[in-house]
């Protein structure tokens, strides 16, 4: 080992090989059969269950948990997947503590919700590991739909359309499908190449072709897609990153958190991924937490997450904040970056403390930094898109845009949280609307 | 700490908790451990004549579970002792010698002739045992051979055998009854006529606990086949309680002492049996599920309860609820109650709503924000919501005060007691006295 935690600069291999494997293992290992039965027994089978209301995809949670409890996990998986085709990924990445599990009546009763997310994973893994795809296509309709973007929104839409008998071509700018499932989600939430195996499993429905390295823009325009297909679904996510407005923000070592995460997700060997000794992450969302935690896991000595408002305003859930703290990330709030200091490459970064009204308090903070990650939000990029609502594509109803025959959903569309599960729900609902528009069927 | 000493048909024990005749009392080793743990007495596993019986060599138990795999019901196809008579007698003798303050009852089952009883009773007396229990209850295996419940189901046989036994021993005789009959009072009456000092009940209930859906065979399955077994454990407690009460409240049965058995798992269960007329209790499945240590909770629990009620002797509990067991026709139809939901305790699961809406009287309202409230205009006080609510004491039944108007019927709640026998809708109604 040529470097360790104390080596200055941005270097790989700060730890022994086996430490990487251990640190990047499954955040919540899958429940075994016994654990699943014990967890399932706690569900009260509520009437009009609040957990279902809280799930953006409306999975029938009491039903699937009862199916697990009665020894039919594959039936449970079908209940889940019929509402949410990416129920396997959602089981791993959903902030359940803000969704179903927050609403669970046993959270209210005892502060300990039913482990809905982990039970969902138990069921979906059980089915998918047998290679079973429980859905089949309806008679082919002869209609063709273009889906732009193979992230959760696009794939969810594609699957539902294919199931209804339509032919689907998915165009994606990247060389792999999955969107942020493949390039964004924290490594320890989706281990062992689950994102790709889920895509492979999803495509078993048939009727879906994916065209890789095919960005919208350039040769392929929205108009050409509309000409070639009966409908278009836009699910391009947020490809851009907000700029950091601080003096010296262009110095070496100041990077986009999403690029760092994508590199990490694509790395064959985590020991090859370089990381700074003193890392500063700017932002307060899931991306910021993921970048900070993973920098720490890679062996950075000091990782500080700096957010401009209070903890209660952070987009990252309390669970995520606690996770960061437990991994040794220091969280600083009420501080905005003023200047990045260094000679070519960043050496230090200076912040102004601000009050609740975002006014400088006169105090400041200077942190040693050889690597700074921007995680202050992603933005929509693209020309010739339908009308926007703020900085996202405007949609009405189930994803209808201002353009005839063009639907949109997921992060690129206005409304809804930027979450995998929301993207899946919007893709599914748009598919139903497209189906109705193409066939007249309700 | 209350005084828990108990005297049942002249047999003394430091507490009213005995182990029922079953695997926990099968041999010296177990019984010594039981006495060390604190059990007040045991009924030794049923003895029979040599050559001793044999048990199956495959599974002999089946189970029914509640949430978290809590054992709610157990079923068995075990027979009486499968060890030589003399071995048991020798062990009984040394254990009784070493634990003179504990009750030692010996359960017996021999063929339905006087000779075998004449033979076995002196042998038991010689051990120094305090009494005998006649096993007329075992519903499987032994009954096929004309013993156990095959005797217990024919009152004449019960009376006859009991009389033989009384004639051939000075020991107190407890007759253990089978619940596999229509009217428990008949065998109890037969035991009384035969001179029994007490009855004990219940033995196990004919049962098949489950079916193996791959083998298509009842469980427990022995080489592809299964036979019905005897059911016990918490699931049978309500059946046993009723049978105990039926005997206790029958004036014709002359207040024959009862040893209560069936599903007793906690001190509370024991106290309930005693309140319904049992002089003491016997436990089997709870010990088989959790081990002998549970008696410590039973002792401390009963003692705390008695202290809190100011009771100084267990006999003060015995039979206290019997006067309040009546027939349906004597229940007060002028008593009106309404369910009430405590909003501070409610966790909004909606179970009460689903139950009342789908299967009861549509008397619970659910608001947009999941507040659940009882509609007094509809509530018939059936108690279903109370029963399905997962939170204890969250829904309660509140009696209406006389003089108030029941919004469901529009009628004033009468202060006086009135039952079905005088009700105008009863074709056989008699005028109120
Ligand atoms: C670092 C990070 C961590 C996250 N962690 C979580 C989490 O733990 N839990 C959670 O629920 N959510 C999480 N999210 C949010 C979640 O990943 C997104 O909400 C979700 O992926 C949105 O799905 P989408 O299909 O709309 O977009 P994306 O997943 O972004 O997919 C968009 C797809 O479109 C393609 N594309 C983009 N532009 C073009 C173009 N011009 N032409 C063709 N194709 C194009 C992209 O290559 C990509 O495949 C996280 C996000 C980030 C950035
Ligand atoms: C495995 C097993 C064997 C039993 N054997 C006998 C027996 O030999 N003699 C007897 O009188 N009762 C026998 N019983 C019945 C118990 O003594 C007792 O009456 C019955 O189990 C109900 O009590 P419980 O619910 O506490 O278990 C047996 C019960 C079990 C579970
Ligand atoms: S709210 Fe909780 S207990 Fe109720 S159905 Fe959902 S998971 Fe089960
Ligand atoms: S007592 Fe019966 S009728 Fe009244 S609210 Fe409860 S379930 Fe409904
Ligand atoms: S069953 Fe109990 S906890 Fe559930 S909604 Fe009804 S009153 Fe509330």
Image (cartoon, coloured by chain):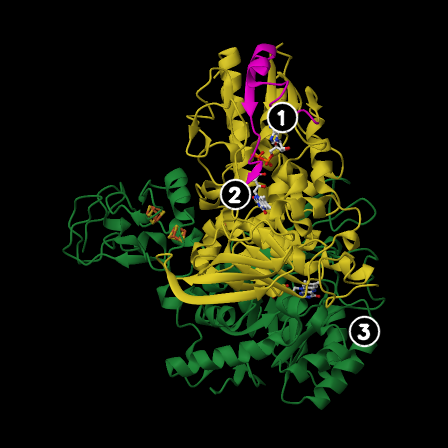
Chain colours: A yellow, B green
Q: Nearer the viewer, residue A208 or B281?
A: A208
Q: Quadrant of residue B47?
A: bottom right
Q: Position of residue B421 (x, y in %)?
A: 27, 50
Residue A242 is tagged as 2
Q: Residues within 10 Å of mark 2 (few under 14, many from 20)?
A: few
Q: Position of residue B49 (x, y in %)?
A: 80, 68
Relative side of A397 to A272, left or right: left
* Marks 2, 1: nearer the viewer: 2
Residue B85 is tagged as 3
Q: Nearer the viewer, residue A330 or B72?
A: A330
Residue at figure coordinates x 71%, y 45% from the top left? A263
Relative side of A1 to A118, left or right: right
Residue at figure coordinates x 49%, y 31% from the top left? A413
Please, which chain is the residue tagged with disc 1 on?
A
The answer to whether residue A42 is seen in the rendering is yes
Q: Earlier in the sequence, mark 2 or mark 1?
A: 1
Q: Are marks 2 and 3 on the same chain?
A: no
| Mark 2 vs mark 3, CA separation in Å | 90 Å
Q: What residue is shown with label 1?
A: A159
């Amino acid at each position: 080992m040529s470097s360790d935690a104390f080596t200055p600069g941005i270097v790989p291999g700060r730890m022994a090989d086996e430490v990487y494997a251990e640190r990047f293992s499954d955040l919540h290992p899958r429940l075994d059969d016994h654990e699943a039965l014990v967890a399932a027994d706690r569900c009260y089978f509520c009437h009009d269950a609040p957990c279902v209301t809280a799930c953006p995809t409306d999975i029938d949670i009491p039903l699937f948990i009862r199916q697990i409890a009665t020894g039919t996990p594959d039936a449970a998986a079908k209940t889940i997947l019929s509402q949410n085709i990416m129920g396997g990924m959602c089981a791993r990445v959903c902030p359940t503590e803000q969704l179903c599990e927050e609403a669970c009546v046993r959270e209210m009763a005892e502060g300990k919700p039913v482990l809905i997310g982990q039970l969902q994973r138990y069921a979906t893994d059980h089915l998918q590991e047998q290679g079973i795809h429980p859905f089949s296509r309806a008679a082919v309709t002869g209609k063709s739909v273009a889906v732009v973007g193979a992230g959760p929104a696009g794939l969810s839409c594609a699957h539902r359309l294919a199931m209804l008998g339509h032919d689907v071509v998915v165009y994606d700018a990247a060389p792999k499908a999955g969107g942020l499932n493949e390039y964004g989600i924290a490594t320890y939430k989706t281990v062992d190449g689950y994102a790709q195996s889920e895509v492979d499993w999803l495509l078993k429905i048939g009727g879906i072709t994916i065209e890789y390295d095919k960005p919208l823009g350039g040769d392929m325009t929205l108009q050409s897609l509309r000409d070639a297909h009966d409908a278009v679904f836009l699910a391009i996510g947020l490809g851009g990153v907000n700029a950091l407005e601080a003096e010296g923000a262009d110095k070496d070592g100041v990077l986009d958190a999403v690029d760092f995460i994508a590199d990490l997700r694509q790395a064959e060997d985590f020991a090859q991924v370089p990381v700074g000794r003193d890392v500063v992450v700017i932002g307060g969302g899931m991306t910021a937490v993921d970048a900070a935690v993973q920098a720490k896991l890679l062996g950075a000595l000091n990782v500080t997450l700096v957010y401009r408002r209070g903890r209660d305003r952070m987009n990252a859930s309390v669970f995520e904040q606690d996770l960061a703290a437990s991994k040794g990330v220091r969280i600083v709030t009420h501080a905005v970056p003023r200047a990045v200091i260094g000679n070519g490459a960043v050496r230090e970064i200076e912040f102004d403390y601000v009050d609740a009204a975002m006014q400088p308090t006169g105090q400041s903070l200077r942190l040693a930094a050889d690597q700074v990650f921007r995680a202050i939000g992603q933005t929509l990029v693209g020309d010739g898109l339908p009308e926007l609502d703020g900085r996202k594509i405007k949609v009405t109803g189930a994803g209808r845009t201002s353009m005839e025959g063009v639907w949109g959903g997921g992060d690129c569309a206005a409304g809804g949280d930027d979450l995998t599960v929301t993207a899946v729900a919007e893709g599914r609902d748009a598919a139903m609307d497209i189906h109705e528009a193409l066939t007249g069927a309700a | 700490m209350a005084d828990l000493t108990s005297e049942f048909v002249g047999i003394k024990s430091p507490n009213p908790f005995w182990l029922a005749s079953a695997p926990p009392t099968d041999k010296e080793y177990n019984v010594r451990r039981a006495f060390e743990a604190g059990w007040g007495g045991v009924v030794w596993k049923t003895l029979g004549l040599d050559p001793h019986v044999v048990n199956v060599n495959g599974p002999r138990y089946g189970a029914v579970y509640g949430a978290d795999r809590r054992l709610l019901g157990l079923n068995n196809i075990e027979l009486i002792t499968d060890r030589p008579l003399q071995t048991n007698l020798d062990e009984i003798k040394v254990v009784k010698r070493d634990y003179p303050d504990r009750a030692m009852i010996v359960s017996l089952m021999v063929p339905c002739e006087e000779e075998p009883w004449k033979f076995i009773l002196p042998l038991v007396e010689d051990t120094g045992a305090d009494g005998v229990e006649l096993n007329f209850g075992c519903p499987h295996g032994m009954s096929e051979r004309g013993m156990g419940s095959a005797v217990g189901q024919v009152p004449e046989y019960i009376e006859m055998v009991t009389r033989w036994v009384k004639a051939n021993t000075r020991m107190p005789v407890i007759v253990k009854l089978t619940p596999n009959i229509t009217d428990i009072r008949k065998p109890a009456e037969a035991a009384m006529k035969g001179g029994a000092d007490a009855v004990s009940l219940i033995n196990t209930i004919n049962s098949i606990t489950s079916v193996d859906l791959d083998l298509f065979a009842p469980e427990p399955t022995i080489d592809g086949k299964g036979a019905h077994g005897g059911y016990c454990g918490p699931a049978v407690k309500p059946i046993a309680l009723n049978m105990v009460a039926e005997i206790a409240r029958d004036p014709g049965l002359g207040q024959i002492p009862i040893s209560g058995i069936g599903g007793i798992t906690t001190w509370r269960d024991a106290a309930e049996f005693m309140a319904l007329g049992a002089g003491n209790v016997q436990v089997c499945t709870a010990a088989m599920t959790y081990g002998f240590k549970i008696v410590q909770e039973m002792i401390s629990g009963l003692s705390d309860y008695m202290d809190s009620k100011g009771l100084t002797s267990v006999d003060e509990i015995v039979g206290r609820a019997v006067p309040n067991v009546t027939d349906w026709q004597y229940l007060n139809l002028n008593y009106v109650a309404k369910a009430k939901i405590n909003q501070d305790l409610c966790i909004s699961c909606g179970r009460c709503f689903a139950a009342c809406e789908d299967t009861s009287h549509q008397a619970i309202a659910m608001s947009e924000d999941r507040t659940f409230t009882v509609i007094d205009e509809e509530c018939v006080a059936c108690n279903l919501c109370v029963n399905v609510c997962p939170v204890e004491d969250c829904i309660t039944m509140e009696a209406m005060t006389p003089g108030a108007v029941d919004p469901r019927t529009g009628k004033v709640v009468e202060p006086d007691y009135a039952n079905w026998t005088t009700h105008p809708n009863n074709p056989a109604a008699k005028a109120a006295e």
